[in-house]
Image: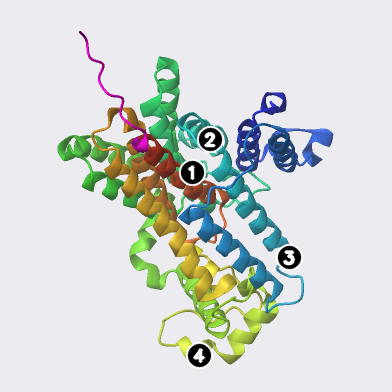
Amino acid sequence: MLPFAIGRPHIGALIAVWTALLAPNDYVYGFATTIHFNFLAVLITLVIWVLSKEPVRIPMNRTVVILLIFGVLGSFSALFEIGPEGAAAAEWSKFAKIIFFALVVSALFNSRARIEALMYAIFLSVGFHGVEEGLKFISSGGEHQVWGPENSMLFDNNHFALATLCTLPLVFYLYRQASHRLLRITLIGSACILFFTVVGTFSRGGLLGLLAIAVWSFIHSPRKGTYLALAIPMAVLLISFAPDRWTNRMDTISNAGQDDSFMVRVTAWKISTLIATDNPILGGGFHAVQDFAVWTKYRLTRFHELDFIPSDEPDPLAPHAAHSIYFQVLGDMGFVGLALFGALGLTAWRNTVVVAKKVKGKADLEWAGQFAQYAQYSLIAYFVSGAALSMAYFEFMYILFVVIASLRHIVEQELAKPVPAPSSQN
């Protein structure tokens, strides 16, 4: 695939996104399992970009500025970590790569064709895994539990549920833009399977994200009766298809206070909060809450200060992950980092709203309004399901943040073009 990127660095970036989210090392054998496909794709893309006629220029919009500040803050947080020296280095390296590549995407994906190509790269990576696992879930009669690709951050069933939920709206967008009949059938069929995939993860966060998307979609549906006529049978089918152990697990949502898994999360949230109160500007450094020395310090000295919030006592033998995108950033980068993280999400949301308003009634820009609409569903899925998952540095979302900013720039450029005067006939 790489020869097609010569002179066209955006194709190299597509390959980089695809390899990052697909984790192709799980599908190859022998020496190929040791090849760093994503690193090579990024490296070759940068070389091609410098040698091509494509301008090497990062657009300085609001999203990019916040992203840059967020990246700098994360670097200082890692430098002044409160855990053992060098403990945050590996996580900082992943974080820096995500920020850097998001900036590359912001520069290269500046047209409708490129944005849609990027959505197909995501569909052919996260969507591929989702369809594959969803078919296993269906063919097993609901007995197979869905997991993500091994050797990636998506292996955890909860993480994979969130990634699938974020991808699902974009598949619907591609379906609405596609004109080829076979492609449309493939996309809508995949979208239906992805619903079963989310159920098959047995993830309670995934279910909450799915419900949030459904409610938001219903609120904004112009044909609510038709929506209910389709949604209710689909929900009944999904629930009836799911095995009893899925139903039993979902029932624990209503009794979160008695659920051990949830109360462990609350314990980690409290320690993350204490870390941030001691280090409000820089936080404790990446994964500080998961460092045994840091965990033990706050367990023994300050945990009692938040006793007014019910939770289990911290595990004396092992620390736990933050289990929340919000508390993860709070512990890692303090209150300033959390504010910047929230600003990224709010700016992305505002951009979708602005695009939707600007293109209303513009037939030639209808695609942009549809993309903004479906991107909102992805944002909702991330910020709802992510409330109980450690996925604050999920590269998919940072790519989406900058693509939404690019979408707004494209729309504003198109609307700023002078309208050609009607030709007069003598």
Q: CA distance from mark 3 to mark 4?
A: 31 Å
Give the residue pinned by disc 3.
89
In three-dimensional space, the C-alpha distance between marks 4 and 2, rounded to whole angstroms, equals: 48 Å
| Residue closer to the observer: 156 or 115 | 115
**Element marked by disc 4:** helix
Q: Nearer the viewer, mark 4 or mark 2?
A: 2
Q: Residues within 10 Å of mark 2 (few under 14, many from 20)?
A: many
Percent position of residue 256, x then y? 39, 68
Whichever of labels 1 and 4 marks the residue nearer the N terminus, that label is 4
Mark 1 and mark 2 in contact? Answer it, CB < 8 Å. Answer: yes
User: Taking 275 as reference, is 328 above or below it?
Assistant: above
For residue 3, side relative to residue 324 (left or right): right
Outermost residue, left direction? Answer: 225
Three-letter code for the amino acid on which mark 1 is drawn: Val
Label 2: state its secondary structure.
helix
What residue would you read off at disc 2?
118
Residue placed under numbered mark 4 in the picture: 304
* Of residues 266 and 22, the one drawn nearer to the viewer in this rendering: 22
Highlighted magenta segment, given as a residue range = 415-426
Q: Sequence order check: which comes first, mark 3 or mark 4? A: 3
Residue 397 sits above or below residue 167 on the image: below
Q: In front of the other: label 1 or label 4?
A: 1
Residue pictured at 46% horizontal, 86% vertical: 306
Residue underneath mark 1: 403
Mark 4 and mark 2 residues within 8 Å of each other at the beta carbon:
no
Image quadrant containing the C terminus: top left
* Magenta-drawn stretch contains 424: yes
How many residues crowd around disc 3 within 10 Å: few (fewer than 14), some, or many (20 or more)?
some
Q: Are the residues tagged 1 and 4 within 8 Å (C-beta)?
A: no
3D distance between C-alphas at marks 1 and 2? 9 Å
Classify the position of the N terminus by image quarter. top right
Task: Please state if 422 lies on the left or on the right of 5 as rendered.
Answer: left
